[in-house]
Amino acid sequence: MKSKHLSYWLFLFPSLFALVIVVFVPLLMGIYYSFTNWNGQGVTEFVGIEHYVRLFNDQDFINSLFFTARFTFVSLIGINLIGLVLALLLTRKSKLNTPLRTIFFMPNLIGGIILGFIWQFIFLRSFESIAEATGWSFFAGWLSTPLTGFWGLIILYLWQMSGYIMIIYISFLNNIPTDIIEAASIDGANNWQSFWKIKIPMLAPAFTVSLFLTLSGAFRVYDQNMALTGGGPFNSTQMVAMNIFNTAFRANNMAYAQAQAFVFLIFVTIISISQLYITRRKETNL
């Protein structure tokens, strides 16, 4: 019995060691540095909560937080809606299902920086060419205003992530017993009633997983933001991850960036745990 217990911990030790070294130790060090005037090389003095007081009066950080929250909310709805619709379409009997699943999933395999430059070319070159050829002002000046910059980021992220979430919904849809659907159709249920009364309740765990992945992923967006808009114009499309990076490595204010990162961590953790709690409760009620 003791040998089994020892082998269990020996098997877990490498993963636990890596987790502690890569996650927990840097987290604790970062929290400590946020209360100091750490310059990236050494601690010069302990300043207490000075950085946190400054943070809540930092309009640039607050604006980036609200922009990130708005981006996350729209992405959360859009990605899951598109992913679910694609999953429903691609679980029907068709010879094109496999190639279409591959095509829709492929954008997720492309790096965020490359995606950003691809869509920057589309918005700035292709859209401008369309605007010049047709005279339609809708295609002119994309990424040059806060509104078009926001929707440009949304379009990029929807294109990248919808296929990934689609795969999750497909896996759950394929696990729904066909005899239940057939029994419902024999009882007179149409496609909408089968979807709403049978598929939606049985997809509840998929909603929990997909919403969590979308939520946590949208809050962490950096490379797409950097490549597509660079936070412009005038930092109006700057997300929190970019704001923290600029504070640390461009303004060379490491300790203040650590305070920003810790507050952002708490913010994301509270929202993510709340989402998991609410959706888990919904699973039991459906």
Image: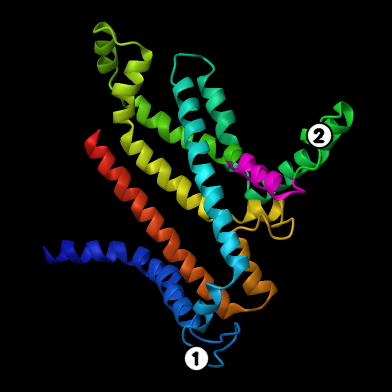
- In x, y percent, where is residue 26? 46, 74
Q: Nearer the viewer, residue 285 or 7?
A: 285
Residue positioned 37% across, 16% down in the render: 192
Residue positioned 41% across, 47% down in the render: 212
Q: Tell me if label 2 and label 1 are in contact, CB under 8 Å.
A: no
Mark 2 = which residue? 137
Magenta run includes residue 80: no
Name the N-terminal-most of marks 2 and 1.
1
Magenta run includes residue 144: yes
Mark 1 = which residue? 46
Magenta residues (range): 143-157
Residue positioned 88% across, 32% down in the render: 132
Quick check: can you spot residue 208?
A: yes
Q: Nearer the viewer, residue 1 or 26?
A: 26
Quick one: quadrant of the N terminus?
bottom left
- Badge 1: how crowded within 10 Å, few (<14), some, or many (20+)? some
Mark 2 vs mark 1: give the one in front: 2
User: Which amino acid, mark 1?
Assistant: Phe
Residue positioned 63% across, 66% down in the render: 60
| Residue 247 against residue 201 in the figure, above or below | below
| Residue 94 against residue 260 in the figure, above or below | above
- Badge 2: how crowded within 10 Å, few (<14), some, or many (20+)? few
- In x, y percent, where is residue 246? 66, 68
Is 78 displayed left or right of 134 in the figure? left
